[in-house]
Amino acid sequence: MVSKKNVDRVSLKQQTSRAVSSVDQIREFFSENTELFSDPDQIMPAILDGQLCLDMIATVAVAQQPQIKRVLDLGCGGGNASNLLLQKLQSKAPNLRNQLPDVNLTLVDLSREMLQTAEKSLAKRTSGIIKTHAQDIRKLSLKENHYDVILCSLVLHHLRHEREWLDTYKQLHTALRPGASLFVFDLVDITSSSIHQDAYTRYGQYLSKTVDDEYRDFVFDHIKQEDTPRSLLWQIDQLRAIGFSEVDILHKHLCYAAFNAIK
Ligand SMILES: C[S@@+](CC[C@H](N)C(=O)[O-])C[C@H]1O[C@@H](n2cnc3c(N)ncnc32)[C@H](O)[C@@H]1O
């Protein structure tokens, strides 16, 4: 669980109030807080149903892509999403029990510190090749028709303008091989002001209960300063318009959602 003690122990470096963070500020923030964001036990309880959603994504990914070989993890952080996927893959294949799955991983993150942590941890979970790219997802040049699974966990909400969202989703569609799967877990916007208010009241109560009011304020300030999410329905519409053949929702809880699109 996220406890006040845990938060203090990793000495979370809070950013000062200002307009929405730049790419450099986001990189700096995550690089300074690598330990916290790499530890699912510390960070996931602050995110509504975070662990559940990553677990659902891993389970569905293995079911949709049993011959999974190439995975792209965007904004991989410490590798939490890929880690769960590889664990699930190993547990679903009894003949692999004493063998690591042979999955090639491409990890992308702004922060070199995050990438180093992810690579170290994921090297224990796959016998495949791990490639790391310290890059902004907006500047990626991805291979076409290549990946079996693309994971985007808690990263796309850093995209700003509509054009960036559309270009990113188009590029992900192109990078997937036909029949391959995209999974997104993220903070989502709520366009109705009454539903938004209710959702954030409930999320705030959850954060206060899980840690304390100070932590709730920190999380809310952070969202305000750094995050520009789009609504779940807007994203679903764009994915359909771009050409994904099946788009479906895995889970939604207040301002967080997990969803899946098949090329
Ligand atoms: C909240 S962490 C999530 C990490 C991981 N996916 C997880 O679920 O635990 C967000 C990560 O996205 C990275 N990130 C944010 N904006 C990015 C961008 N434009 N391009 C690449 N990585 C980005 C950050 O450096 C950070 O490591």
Image: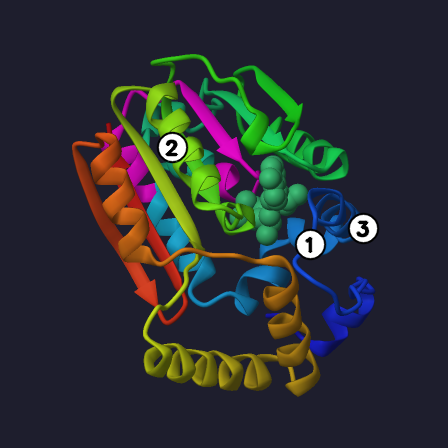
In the picture, measured across the screen, residue 187 lies left or right of residue 115, that is left
Q: How crowded is mark 2: few (under 14 residues within 10 Å), some or many (20 or more)?
A: many
Q: Nearer the viewer, mark 2 or mark 1?
A: 1
From the viewer's side, name the closer residue of 49 and 259: 259
> Which residue position is annotated with label 1?
21
For the rendered model, the colour scheme is rainbow
Q: Which of marks 3 and 2 is in front?
A: 3
Disc 1/disc 3 C-alpha distance (Å): 15 Å
Residue depicted at x 54% and y 61%: 44
Q: Quadrant of residue 143?
A: top left
> Which residue position is annotated with label 3?
32
Label 1 sits on what residue type?
Ser
Q: Give the range drawn in magenta.
A: 59-83
> Which residue position is annotated with label 2?
89
Quarter of the picture containing the C terminus is top left
Q: Describe the element under mark 3 as helix, strand or loop.
A: helix
Residue depicted at x 74% and y 65%: 18
Q: Residues within 10 Å of mark 1 (few under 14, many from 20)?
A: some
Q: Which of marks 1 and 3 is in front?
A: 1
Query: In terms of image quarters, where does ligand 1 lie?
Result: top right
Q: Where in the figure is residue 122, as x and y percent of width and height? A: 59, 31
Q: Describe the element under mark 1 as helix, strand or loop.
A: loop
Dot 2 or dot 1, earlier in sequence: 1
Q: How many labels does the image show?
A: 3
| Mark 2 vs ligand 1: CB below 8 Å | no
